[in-house]
Amino acid sequence: MKTVKGSYISGYLQIQVNGEYPERFLQTCAANGIMLWEIQKQSTNQCTAMVQLKDVQKIKKLRHGSNYKIYFKKKYGIPFLNKKAKRKKPLLFGLLLSVLLFFMLSNMIWQVTVTGVPEELENKIYERLSSYGVHPGAFTFTVDSPNQIQQLLLEDVPELLWVGIEKRGTSFYLEGVEKLIVKDEEKKSPRHLVANKSGVIKSMYVKKGLPQVRVNDFVEKGKILVSGAIEKLNMEKTKEEENEEVYYEYLASEGEVIATTWYRAEVLIPLQSEHIELTGNIDENYRFGIGSYTFPIWPWNKKEFDDEIKEIDEKKLEIFGWEFPLYIVKEKRMESTSKITERTREQAIEAGIQQAKEDLYRKLGNDARIISEKVLHETNRHGKVKLSLYITVEENIAIEQPINQGD
Amino acid sequence: MKKWHLRLRNLMVDYLSLPSDVLLELPRLTMIGNFHLYIENHKGLETYSETELKVKTTNGYVQILGSSFVLKQMLPEEILLEGEIEEVKYLPS
């Protein structure tokens, strides 16, 4: 007794026979040398059986001229696998294409970054690199090895002292060190130092030039503090022509003159102050935009806030430097409430002084130092405090003024 | 004529000890327990359903009754039946 089983290699299938006495049809099949197995009767007029693929033609011939209907239900085996694959040609094509694309894209240079050098030089390096064929979008197998590129770069860009090139996956990282070319300092033209503000001199530090004032002197705006003109000692000339005018030697005076200066400031401070606070409720949602239209993607439901602060972050899609008109917007809305705080008169005055000081610092810069402040006048009207302040500051009042040599 | 043939064959089976199924063209039924039945040398399937199998033979029919019948294998002159076999009957034609 040999058992029959379908071979997966040659293929087999399940047929369904419909008609009166389906087993009779199967009997004729068997009598014609067709191997059948797993015969089952579903109902009086329906029978299923397994047959080999090679017998299908015979079955079709036998069915011809009979009243039976035959359906091929299930198919097993490699021959059908091929047929299935043939039917899925687009899929196969897509698979092949994706493999090809993956190979291509992974062999492209996607990023070239240069660090450690000024922008000007960076651009020059980029230019050189793209002339060697190293630029985003180029294939890596057409590009020289990093060592060769390094040598070429060092030859072609004389400003570079050293350059390190690293290839990491699809990106190139370059780190450069610039040759610093030290330039001689420019010769300064002769000049005086003059006061740009009135004040009492507190201290002086003169590097070059002839001081014209002393500590504790009061100086008006525009007065020469340090002169750049120095009398020349010319022995010969003074001997011959005693009445001749004095000759000067001019130089660029340098120095610092710290003086006490005064400022009057008026500030208006409301007794009620309003400021905005975040409550901590945040709603984030993503939107999809085309042109000037946006559609919400996720989440659909928006939280409603009475007052809110919005943060919008747009992300554009890019391919090969070509921008899509599509973008994704991330919108972050934070709930805010305004809070009103009451202040006492003293607090208001303090805040006013602080504000005046800050304003002054902003105007004078960080070198200035506020020594003292005094409230000259104070009025309290309509819920606001008006202050008149007198502020004493120590600062450098010297500014340069070129000497007109008159030639 | 036929009877004479039969008598000769019967004699050959008796005296030459040849297998009876071949010479007499009778079906050979092999049963394993009550779930497998192997029928050889039949002359065609007459009816088949979940509960009944009827096979033609030279002198009549063989009827098998039972339940959940499946024909595990079907070749020109062989049938392997699987299922719960309750009865095997010989019916004259």
Image (spheres, rainbow, N blue to C red):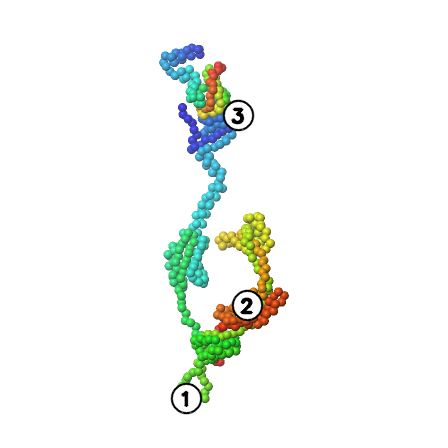
Q: Tag 1 or tag 2, which sits nearer the N-term?
A: 1
**Mark 3 → mark 2, Cα distance in angstroms:** 103 Å
- Give x and y (percent) for residue A58: 47, 27
**Mark 2 → mark 1, Cα distance in angstroms:** 64 Å
**Mark 3 → mark 1, Cα distance in angstroms:** 146 Å
- Give x and y (percent) for residue A221: 52, 77
- Horizontal side of A376 relative to A177 (left or right) equals right
Query: Dot 3 surroundings within 10 Å: few (below 14), some, or many (20 or more)?
Result: few
- Residue A239's tag is 1
Q: Amino acid at mark 1?
A: Lys
Is residue A172 something that shows in the picture? yes
Host chain of mark 2: A
Q: Nearer the viewer, residue A200 or B63?
A: A200
Q: Tag 1 or tag 3, which sits nearer the N-term?
A: 3
Q: Amino acid at mark 3?
A: Ser
Query: Dot 1 surroundings within 10 Å: few (below 14), some, or many (20 or more)?
Result: few
Camera-nearest label, 2 or 1: 2
Host chain of mark 3: A
Label 3–label 2 contact, CB within 8 A:
no
Secondary element at image label 2: helix
Q: Nearer the viewer, residue A85 or A218?
A: A218
Q: Amino acid at mark 2?
A: Ile
Q: Which residue is mark 2?
A: A353
Secondary element at image label 1: helix
Q: Quadrant of residue B73?
A: top left
